Amino acid sequence: MIINYCNIALYVEFSYEEAEPATYDYPGSPDEATIESVKVNDVDIYDLLGAEQLYDIQELICKQMRD
């Protein structure tokens, strides 16, 4: 998936789990994206990104998957 982050097009490979609804005896769970790689021009920059940046990218992925 192509994600636009800070005006840079990132090609992100990830796995995605949909949210589970809450029930009477189960609180449910939010959707979640696990990033496997982040590439710019075929160069994997995953190790260069900080925790906050990865979190932002995960949120963008979840938002796009929900839409």
Image (tube, rainbow, N blue to C red):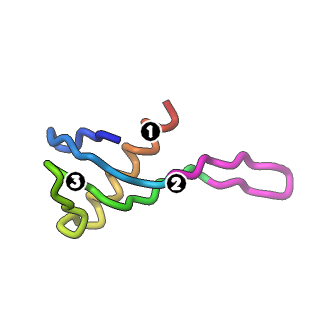
Alpha-carbon distance for marks 1 and 2? Answer: 10 Å
Residue 41, x across and y down, in percent: 14, 48
| 11 sits left or right of 64 in the view | left
How packed mark 2 is, by other alpha carbons closer than 10 Å (few <14, some 14-19, many 20 or more), is: some
Extent of the magenta region: 16-29
Residue on which the image places disc 2 = 32
User: Amino acid type of disc 2?
Assistant: Glu
Residue on which the image places disc 1 = 63
User: Amino acid type of disc 3?
Assistant: Lys
Q: Are marks 3 and 2 in contact (CB under 8 Å)?
A: no
Earlier in the chain: of badge 1 and badge 3, it is 3
Give residue 63's quadrant in the image: top left
Q: Nearer the viewer, residue 59 or 9?
A: 9
Q: Residue 24: within the magenta?
A: yes
| 21 up-or-down from 34: above or below | above
User: Amino acid type of disc 1?
Assistant: Lys
Earlier in the chain: of badge 1 and badge 2, it is 2
Give residue 38's quadrant in the image: bottom left
| Residue, far right | 24
Residue 40, x across and y down, in percent: 16, 50
Alpha-carbon distance for marks 1 and 3? Answer: 20 Å
| Residue, far bottom | 47
Residue on which the image places disc 3 = 39
